[in-house]
Amino acid sequence: MHGVVKRFGQLTAVNGLDLEVRAGACYGLLGPNGAGKSTAMRILTGQAIADAGEASVLGFELPGESKLARARMGICPQESNLDVDLCVRDVLEVFARLYRVPAAERPAAVERALAVAGLHSRALDKAAKLSGGMQRRLLIGRALIHRPELVLLDEPTVGLDPQVRQELWSLIISLREQGATVLMSTHYIEEAQRLADRVAIMSAGRVVAEGTPAELIRAYAGREVLEVHGSLTEIRDLQARALADGLPTRQSGPALTYLHADEANGQLPEGARRAATLEDVFVRLTGDYVE
Amino acid sequence: MNDVNAGRIELPSLSAVWVREWIVFRYFWHTRTFGAIVEPVIMLLAFGFGFGKLVSHVDGIPYIQFVGTGVVATTVLFSATFTAMFDGLYKRRYQRVYDAMLAAPVDVSEIVTGETLFKGVRAGAYGTAPLLVAFCFGLPPEPAMLLVPFIGALTGIGFAALGMLFATLSDTFDGLSYVISGVITPLFLIAGTFFPLDRMPEWLRVLAWFNPLYHCVQLVRDCAFGLHPAADLIHIGALVLFAVIAWWVAVRRTAVRLID
């Protein structure tokens, strides 16, 4: 994607987005709600058409050749759009056909997707009866039914129990091991840090930083950070002083975090030092936009 | 993997849409069939017996047979338009299945075409029910009546497309009452189903010519009581024209609502 812009009336959801995902990578789109991640995904599936800029997927130009691209990609949307009136097996059967899985391979594809979703025992239950975690697994099984080369996962673990989230993480890792390219959006920092080999941080419809998690941490938060706890007035005073001294900080509730603490010699107040994380980077880069 | 061609309506996509419709029908055939058949049959009996007491014959045809042949079109209209309209809104707005389908190599034109054909043909099948009831009231079977399911399907395809078009006009089920009361009810009444139009004022007869349902009613009656080849070809032409226009507009409008 190069310079992609998408507006909805007054709102500009995607504003000059540049994004390049290499084959075989697991790429994380990290950003707060409303940063334009889902819109970017919809542009990739041809369900939103960019107002400006160029986009291509798997060598196919969008939106003209979108149908060819869609045959080779699978998507797990943020909100369930399952055919809830159908039983689990029928959902997969229908999508095997929609994704053009040849008739001879269809039964095996449905079985494989049931295994991915871990829903063999629920195959004849209506999708509406599944729990939230099971529905998400079914969405992923459905997205993988035609062995896509590219998998788009839009906030795959939002709202799920920790153990279901762990299961999905293993699933995503195994996808990569099988050679698929994964583009995943999330606003869970831990998810991006664990799974993605490259991360783009999005804010207000564009990429504000891009690189491996380690590169991003080094560039935007340093090796170590220093956390100072105090009352809100103390924190405000400290922040004002840090701003005057040109020290990069980020506020996180009742604490102020000094970034690049290892490079700032002697100017810092007393506090707890810890290793910098992607969260420090994320809040620094996107915090300006969040009230 | 089969070859995928951009910008074309392809059979694999249509058949996938049909299979989905068929599976859903297998789950809900009893409710859909009950609604589609019982209501027009009640209408036929109520008008046939009630009104039939006052009017024994219309154009030399016993009134109940006149209504029985006319209600075929009503059955087709209700079955095709209502299922397409409610289904379309449900799948776009509430269940969001269209969103899921469009992420696969399927275009809006293929979804609209597939669903329209399926619902239209089903409506044609349902349309034969009032005719079977009319047989019980002395309507003599004619070989030309074998054409009725085809006439019903052709009419149904147009009205299913119209239903899908209506589904794009509202984001709530309540909002659909405008088209139900404002469009469907007048279409249903000014079609010559319950009373012959040739005794109505000139303007109403002209208006009826623009009502696709009127052409369906005429064709079904001609199958039962004697064909008029020249006029019937015009009726068929009108139904084909209606189906093509309704389909084309439905595809455009649905694309506007589904693709940002």
Image (cartoon, rainbow, N blue to C red):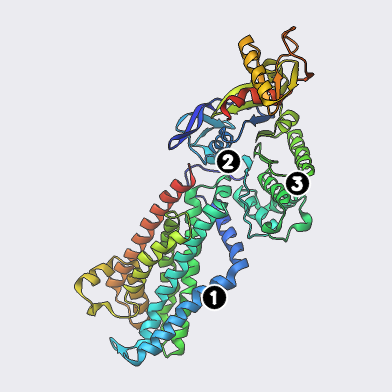
Which is more toward the observer, B184 or B174? B174
Q: Which mark is residue A116?
A: 3
Which is more toward the observer, A172 or B183? B183
Per the image, the residue denoted by label 1 is: B34
Image vertical order of residue A223 relative to residue A182, above or below = above
In the image, what residue type sits under mark 2?
Arg
Have a look at marks 3 and 2 and say if they share a chain. Answer: yes
In the image, what residue type sits under mark 1?
Phe
Image vertical order of residue A128 relative to residue A76, above or below = below
User: Residue B52 at x, y = what percent?
Assistant: 36, 89
Note whether residue B150 is visible. Answer: no
Left or right, B135 with respect to A214, comes to left
Q: CA distance from mark 1 to mark 2?
A: 39 Å
Furthest-top residue in view? A265
User: Residue B215 at x, y = what percent?
Assistant: 33, 70
Q: Please, what secondary structure does the residue beneath circle 3 have?
A: helix
> What residue is rendered at 50% in x and 57% in y?
B88
Please name which of the two marks, 1 or 2, marks the residue nearer to the observer: 1
**Mark 3 nearby-residue class (10 Å; few <14, some 14–19, many ≥20):** some
Q: Please, what secondary structure does the residue beneath circle 2 have?
A: helix
Per the image, the residue denoted by label 2 is: A70
Cβ atoms under marks 3 and 1 closer than 8 Å: no
